[in-house]
Amino acid sequence: MWKMNALDSDTFLNQVSLALNNPIHNRCSDLTVLLESASVKDLQHLFPLLIDNIFGPQGTVAWGLRTITANLKPYDFHALQNFFSPMGPMFKVIYTLIKDPLIKYDFSITYLPMKIRQLLDAGSVHPFYSDLVHVSPQNKQIVSLLLNPFDYYMFHFAYHLINPWHQRNDLPLGSTWNSVYYILCCDYVLHFFPTQPIQVQPPVGIGGKLTSNQPSAFSQQLSSPSQIPTKLLRKDFFNDPVAEFKLHPPLDKHPRAEIWRSESVLIIFLDMWLNNDQISQPQESFNMNLSAKRSLHFNEVPAGEYVRIIRILVKQLHAFSASQKIDDGHMVELKKITLPIMQGKMYVFLRNLIHRWPLDGSFRLVLELWLSFIQPWRYAVISQPKKLKNKLPSDLNLDSDEGQANSTKGVDKEYLPFIAENILAYVVIFQQLLPRFLRVDLSSPKNSLMLYRLAKVFDQPNLVSFIKEIENCIEENYSTSNHGFSSYNISNSMPPLSPTAQWSSNRSHLPSHIGSITDDAKLISMEKDRIIGSKYVIIVKQKIYELEGTNFCYKPLFISPPAPEVYDLLNHILKARLTAVEIIDHRNAELKRRRSGIFGFLKQLFSSDDFLGDEFSLEDRKKVPGYLDFASQYLCDMFSINAAILNETIGSLNTTTKPPIIEDENNFPKLLTPEKVRERIYKMKFEGDPDLQAIRSDEVTLLVKMFYDCASKINENYGYKIKSFYEDPTYIGKIARQIISPPITIYKYDKSNYAQPRRIAERLPPRISLRFFASYKFLVYMSLGVLISTLFHYSIPTFIFFVFSFWFCWICIKALFDKTEIVRTPNLFDNLSFDQSF
């Protein structure tokens, strides 16, 4: 009998192994059948192998959850979504294994973020991990977490997003925004954090088919409801004598069976994603934490998919927490502690992410994430659950102001405690962002839209008044004495803030004698009467110490008069608006010139109005002045600045902050302003091989590549003959010079020395170029000619012969007047410059 069972197990594992080698859509269907008919013992041994095969935590080939999209592979996409859905075959296996509480799996501690590992070693980690740690008996060090099947799957799922082996920043922008992984994140967030007061189906009732003859170990081991895992809620919450002694509900109907999964998902997602080493740790230490660092390429910032997933989580947690008002079920206690668990980690995550993100248009993702976090009232309207996965188009359009109807009513006073607990997220991050807008070109539609969104959010009714009310409780100078630190102090990972005379600064990265407390600059001190007079002072004080540390100098955002950075930004907005208007006028004039005449009319029919070298359309450019006008008005309203004071202050800034005259350019770096940068861009020209220039919008990509390969073959095989024809002094040479491209000097950059790349000149000989035939202009003219010849009953070969004859006659006539001076091109070895090469 034992041999029969062993044979069946081997056969089952062989069938699973064959199924894992099939294509994705066949793999999911085959595994569904095999897992439904498997015994608990087989599933127990297969489960960790299947998880490794799905996610590839060690860098092995995984199932491609982050690369498969509905557009590229629709069959694979839907098969994976159904297989991993919260009620799909994978979770049926998980809930079947959960019936035996003795089934545990090791999750390596190396997969955890560095911050969580440090807290585990220090013994100050969240109570969620208290019963999960596995200590090595040899060195008494924590080596892994012992997890039940559900937690084991969720930890691996969360780690897949931050696994450095699976970073996908090399993909085109937006290619992973509709990936299977993103859709599954939406499914899990909606399923485990419901906003409606409905009862979540307990996992015990979903279990798959059991082929074991033994009774369920779940009913034997969990003899009392206290055995169901839950770590976040207080113990007396479930001690309901009516439920325990009068109703005697089945174990799978006990309230803990509903809550512990949401509890686990909350802690796992927040700890794994918001403590990501790629964001919270310095790049050097992050590289040193991996043994295979030479084999990995680390990106400076995560992919856009990562930021969007965090935003989806934040939005749903806001709605999940707000739904406690209409929920009298067992989930209400978890909803009460959701935001306190999230908000500190979220603040640190945003501070580090903003510090690392480059100065480009992709910063819109980070900005919208921050705005979603600081506006919980946008998600307070409880209605039918939003299907985030079905609202991908609107979510991709970040310009849409979600919850606008709710925000126009103003911020309700019930959110004043949230603003007080997260005052740093409003004030410090705002102070961190404004200097960033001073360093970008606000005449760009993307940057102007971001500034408009920022100013519009803070101009909501009551928001600024609430922030001022809280800031009035805090003096500009503080004292650091007699403070008790939280167990979750994370100030050592915070990026520095530029110390200014008016705004907050972080001196934690300066030497100790610079950041020491003096009588002139004490860090935090509060008068006793003000502490008594405001209930929010203690909250704000505690949050400052917990999140920023002792060396942080908090200063209010709304001071009188406003900080110079505000006037600098308004001045920058004014200049950017003038530049934007100039660009629009230039584009309109150029567009009018291009549309003039009959040929301009034909161009308008067969080509777009997009300008070469400009990534924005004219319609996008026309929106910029409006964005900047509204942003300037919102900022003036926020800081109580009237037009007269604004003009006077900006005028004084323009005269007093004029840059000094640089007499010796060799001793001082040149000052680059946005105007100078744009002027350089307009004057820039391509100095390389004309045939290798970037494909323009008026060219067919496929034809450009095809004609380039053809011309390269001709030049390679007949280069000497082409050169001799071009240099022929007779009439034949004059004709050849009308057809053959002349020799030119191009420039390349030697980047072998990255610090000092060299500009090297190279001479191109006479050559054949066919790129003209790949332009839309040539194709349109030829198509019109073929159409006209067909109307007059001429064949296409006759038309081609006529065109070729006319072209050749025109070339011969031009050759009669050719006075091109023949330039003898050097031989191949003459191109070498021994001074530069050796």
Image (spheres, grey):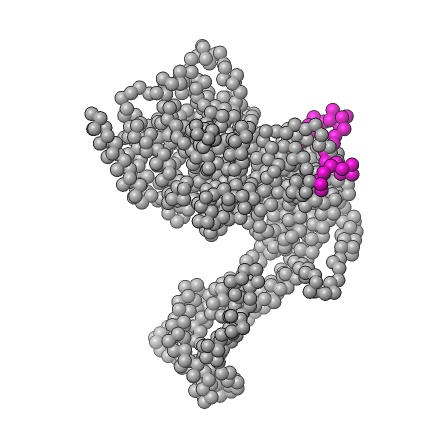
Drawn side of residue 624 relative to residue 202, left or right: right
Residue 484, above or below 751:
above
The percent position of residue 585, horizontal first and vertical second, equals: 64, 62
Residue at 46 percent across and 30 percent down: it is 139
Q: Which residues are magenta?
A: 513-540
**Toward which corner of the image does residue 432 lie, by quadrant?**
top right
Residue drawn at (68%, 45%) of the image: 498
Percent across and percent down for residue 170 are 46, 51
Number of dots carrying numbers: 0
The answer to whether any part of residue 134 appears in the image is no
Residue at 46% x, 77% y: name it: 829
Most distant residue in the top direction: 246
Q: Which quadrant would residue 497 be assigned to in this image?
A: top right
Q: Position of residue 697 (x, y in %)?
A: 49, 63
In the image, residue 531 lies in the stretch drawn in magenta: yes
Question: At 60% across and 45% down in the image, what residue appears?
Answer: 355
Residue 664 can be seen, yes or no: yes
Secondary structure that dominates the magenta span = loop
> Along the horizontal axis of the image, is 796 left or right of 482?
left
Q: Where 617 sits versus 403, above or below?
A: below
In this view of the protein, which residue sits in the foreground, 838 or 301?
Answer: 838
Residue ranking furthest to the bottom: 730
Quadrant where the N terminus lies?
top left
Instruction: Report the front residue among 221 and 572.
Output: 221
